[in-house]
Image (cartoon, grey):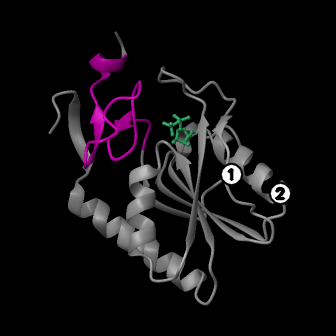
């Protein structure tokens, strides 16, 4: 375990099991269609790549970079589109893949944007859900794991752009971000 972590939340095997369950849920929901899966970068990158490869349903993929945290640990509340999608979402069944739903601001921004561009449907799959931090009334359609108000990093999730490449998710020691 990385020295800056106090404990592991999901190890490699637990992540693989959550990914398989989420992929099976999507396969059932989208059987016979070709949805457009969108990775909300950067946090969802690891989960996204594992999830779309675990699905049997053919999916097309696209990417959008949205950021509201900058280099700190608190959300600014205003998710900024840093890089837009390459493809049109018009008439598409969109599956938005997130690493975490926290305040919900990013989700609302993405939903309004994508539905405003004429998507046929909008489905959200998130690895983590942190309901205690919600400021807007929104929820992923499928969440793999509910977590309290701990600061988690790894498997895509960062603190100040660090720890994203850890192959597991852990709780960051308070001493790291309360300097
Ligand atoms: C994180 C995370 C989600 C969002 C969730 O992204 O990846 O997209 O925050 O928080 P919210 O529900 O309060 O909006 P961040 O803005 O930190 O960018 P990143 O994905 O590049 O880490």
Splitting the image into four quadrants, where does ligand 1 fall? Answer: top right
Q: Which part of the image, by quadrant, shows the C terminus? A: top left
Q: Measured along the vertical axis of the image, is residue 61 above or below residue 5?
A: below
Pinpoint residue 72: horizontal percent, then vertical percent. Answer: 48, 20
103 or 65: nearer the eye?
A: 65
Q: Kindly report which numbered mark, 1 or 2, lies closer to the viewer in this rendering.
A: 2
Residue 116 showing in the rendered view: yes
Locate residue 12 relative to residue 86 in the image: left or right: left
Mark 1 falls on what kind of element?
A: loop
For the point 39% across and 74% down, which residue is it? 54
Pinpoint residue 83: horizontal percent, then vertical percent. Answer: 63, 40
Locate residue 22 relative to residue 121 in the image: left or right: left
Dot 1 or dot 2, earlier in sequence: 2
For the point 39% across and 44% down, which residue is it? 156
Instruction: Say which residue label 1 marks.
Output: 138
Pinpoint residue 124: horizontal percent, then vertical percent. Answer: 61, 61
Q: Which residues are magenta?
A: 148-177
């Amino acid at each position: 375990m990385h020295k800056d972590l106090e404990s592991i939340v999901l190890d490699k095997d637990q992540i693989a099991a959550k990914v398989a369950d989420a992929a099976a849920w999507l396969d059932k929901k989208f059987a016979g269609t070709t949805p457009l899966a969108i990775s909300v970068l950067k946090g969802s990158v690891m989960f996204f790549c594992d999830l779309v490869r675990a699905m049997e349903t053919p999916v097309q993929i696209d990417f959008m970079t949205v950021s509201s945290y900058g280099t700190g640990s608190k959300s600014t509340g205003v998710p900024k589109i840093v890089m837009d999608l390459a493809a049109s979402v018009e008439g598409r069944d969109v599956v938005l893949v997130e690493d975490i739903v926290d305040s919900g601001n990013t989700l609302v921004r993405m939903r309004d944007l994508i539905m405003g561009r004429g998507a046929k449907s909008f489905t959200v799959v998130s690895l983590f859900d942190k309901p205690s931090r919600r400021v807007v009334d929104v929820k992923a359609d499928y969440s793999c794991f509910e977590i309290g108000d701990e600061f988690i990093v790894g498997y895509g999730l960062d603190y100040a752009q660090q720890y994203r490449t850890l192959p597991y998710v852990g709780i960051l020691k308070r001493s790291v971000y309360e300097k």
